[in-house]
């Protein structure tokens, strides 16, 4: 047998998994997760999850996009700066000043949105540790039921509180259908 | 409901009457400024009521769940629309009995000197091309029509909602949904027409295709701010405690945030098109608003009415907190009023064609305040009168259970 990854418990109903998640949360486990076939409202708080920090990535991306858009318009049309392979070239467009913020704003605004979206997607990948092609749960014999009508909860070996016997007993106390082992 | 909560509509009627009385004195003492202040106050309060009407219709057209409780508050506010229509009559009286027919809308005085040295209004080519719309009879008929349309829909939604409290019939919901489908179109057209007539025609030379959308955004922002204040007040005082929760608050706040961005988008688009095209009959409008104190006020609108609320409401914790949203709602309302002054008051020109300055004379502040307090008192009087007559929430609405269960 491969190295143990964690312990998994199977439940029949959303209510069961909700109560189980609350107990695991209150027991203070850190490295654990719940797998459900569909989104369950209120599971976030039952698991004690905090709000996602992906918004921090978004604001950084957005600010960068706004600044980059403004600088790009200023550099190409309003400056004579020399950069490697590029040179600013002052150009009059529509009788307007070489550079004005209102002129650059539509582009800078679109860049804000574009880079906000990039940063959000990128941030989501980083926070979820994606891309990831395999997960030990996928090896579990009954995992297909998790996309049908069963609900799973697993606790990893790496959790500081993890102890094979105690955690197994703890999971059994949650009254699941069954408790199984996950392999690395 | 807690026992010590006893709102008094009469108090608001008295406050409103006092404001109207001060405005009336102003009509004799300082006719023009008092009349313009009254117009600004009336448009500000009407925009709140019309925004509430939009909220009710948007709720019905989407068959929304979460907003059932909030909708009831909007239904109270829209009861003020007929009264606001009555408050429009003094403007008619001022125009024809005040001795100067162009006191508010210059084009109504055909003999007045047109701005920009084009002779009189009657010989002004820019007026002649618009006479089909800017005719006095048509103008007053339009105003009456606008208020009639708003009052009719206000009456229909209120009737359906309150009748459902009694019998619980689903037909009222269907009736409201049909009304909303037609009403959204009609109210959008009439509210745009009102913006053209009451605000844009103050300076009839000007063109802007964005203005109707701008006033829609403005009305939504004002009404959502009032909605936030109302719900926060009712939660604090007891009636909605435990019913209206932080998820509802978050949703209303998110709408206020969305319309912050929408308002900025529209306002910038209007400015940008005019700035880019650079046509004299459009740019003068912004040039006037860069003179004197209007320039810092325009900067205040960019940073205070867009950037600050945007960054503030971008943050989740501030949107689920009653105190922080009460502060933001008050801020938004004052900025909305400032935006109203910015759009309307510079259209008032002196003999040299210079724009009127906000604080050119400190006594004007009396008329500014009385204009808003007069119509505002009437709005709150109508709200509390309706509030006391009906159920606090629509208890038999088909969506009420989903709304009550709405949570984070």
Image (spheres, coloured by chain):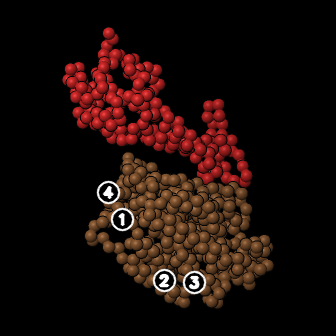
Chain colours: A red, B brown
Whole-percent x, y for residue B350 in the image? 63, 79
Badges 1 and 4, same chain? yes
In terms of sequence position, does the residue under pointer 1 or pointer 4 come before the other?
1
Sequence-wise first label, 4 or 3: 3
Give the labeled residue for mark 2: B20
- Using the rendered image, report if marks 3 and 2 lie on a common chain: yes
Image marks 2 and 1: residues in contact by CB distance under 8 Å: no
Locate residue B351, reporting x and y percent.
Answer: 66, 81
Residue at 60% across, 51% down: A101
Q: Please indicate, yes or no, whether residue B343 appears anywhere in the rendered image.
A: yes
Q: Which residue is mark 3?
A: B90
- For the residue pair B264 and B20, the one nearer the viewer reads as B20
Subunit that carries the residue with mark 4: B
Residue A49's x, y, as percent?
34, 38
The relative height of residue A80 versus residue A102 in the rendered view (above or below) is above
List the residue tagged with mark 4. B242
- Foreground mark, 2 or 1, reads 1
* SS assignment at label 4: loop
Tell me which label, 2 or 4, sits earlier in the chain: 2
């Amino acid at each position: 047998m491969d190295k143990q990854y964690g312990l998994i418990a199977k439940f029949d109903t959303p209510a069961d998994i909700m109560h189980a998640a609350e107990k695991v949360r209150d027991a203070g486990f850190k490295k654990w997760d719940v797998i459900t076939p569909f989104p369950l409202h209120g599971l976030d708080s039952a698991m004690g999850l905090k709000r996602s920090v992906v918004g921090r990535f978004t604001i950084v991306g957005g600010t960068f996009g706004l600044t980059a858009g403004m600088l790009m318009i200023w550099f190409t049309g309003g400056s004579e700066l020399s950069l490697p392979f590029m040179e600013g070239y002052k150009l009059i467009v529509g009788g307007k000043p070489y550079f004005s913020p209102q002129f650059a704003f539509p582009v800078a605004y679109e860049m804000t949105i574009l880079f906000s979206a990039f940063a959000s997607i990128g941030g989501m990948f980083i926070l979820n540790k994606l891309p990831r092609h395999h997960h030990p749960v996928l090896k579990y014999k009954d995992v297909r039921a998790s996309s049908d009508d069963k609900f799973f909860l697993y606790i990893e070996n790496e959790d500081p509180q993890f102890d094979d016997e105690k955690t197994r007993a703890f999971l059994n106390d949650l009254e699941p259908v069954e408790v199984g082992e996950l392999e690395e | 409901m807690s026992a010590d909560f006893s709102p008094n509509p009469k108090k608001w009627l008295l406050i409103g009457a006092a404001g109207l009385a001060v405005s009336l004195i102003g009509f004799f003492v300082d006719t023009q400024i008092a009349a313009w202040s009254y117009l600004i106050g009336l448009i500000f309060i009407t925009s709140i009521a019309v925004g509430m009407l939009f909220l009710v219709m948007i709720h019905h057209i989407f068959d929304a769940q979460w907003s059932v409780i909030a909708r009831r508050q909007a239904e109270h506010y829209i009861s003020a629309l007929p009264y606001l229509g009555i408050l429009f009559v003094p403007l008619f009286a001022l125009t024809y009995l005040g001795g100067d027919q162009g006191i508010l809308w210059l084009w109504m005085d055909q003999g007045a000197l047109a701005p920009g040295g084009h002779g009189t209004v009657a010989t002004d080519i820019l007026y002649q091309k618009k006479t089909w719309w800017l005719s006095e009879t048509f103008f007053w008929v339009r105003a009456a029509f606008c208020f009639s349309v708003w009052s009719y829909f206000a009456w229909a939604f209120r009737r359906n909602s309150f009748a459902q409290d009694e019998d619980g019939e689903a037909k009222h919901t269907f009736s409201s949904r049909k009304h909303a489908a037609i009403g959204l179109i009609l109210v959008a057209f009439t509210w745009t027409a009102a913006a053209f007539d009451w605000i844009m025609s103050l300076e009839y030379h000007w063109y802007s295709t964005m203005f109707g959308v701008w006033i829609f955004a403005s009305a939504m922002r004002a009404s959502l701010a009032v909605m936030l204040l109302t719900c926060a007040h009712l939660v604090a005082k007891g009636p909605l405690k435990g019913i209206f929760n932080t998820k509802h608050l978050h949703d209303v706040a998110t709408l206020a945030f969305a319309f912050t961005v929408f308002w900025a988008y529209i306002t910038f688009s209007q400015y940008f098109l005019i700035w880019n095209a650079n046509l004299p009959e459009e740019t003068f409008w912004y040039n006037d608003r860069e003179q004197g104190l209007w320039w810092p006020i325009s900067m205040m609108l960019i940073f205070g009415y867009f950037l600050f609320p945007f960054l503030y409401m971008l943050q989740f914790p501030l949107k689920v907190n009653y105190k922080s949203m009460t502060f933001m709602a008050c801020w938004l309302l004052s900025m909305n009023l400032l935006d109203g002054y910015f759009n309307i008051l510079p259209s008032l020109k002196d003999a040299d064609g210079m724009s009127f300055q906000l604080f050119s004379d400190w006594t004007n502040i009396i008329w500014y305040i009385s204009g808003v307090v007069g119509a505002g008192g009437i709005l709150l009087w109508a709200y509390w009168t309706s509030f006391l007559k009906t159920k606090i929430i629509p208890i038999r609405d088909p969506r009420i259970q989903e709304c009550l269960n709405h949570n984070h």
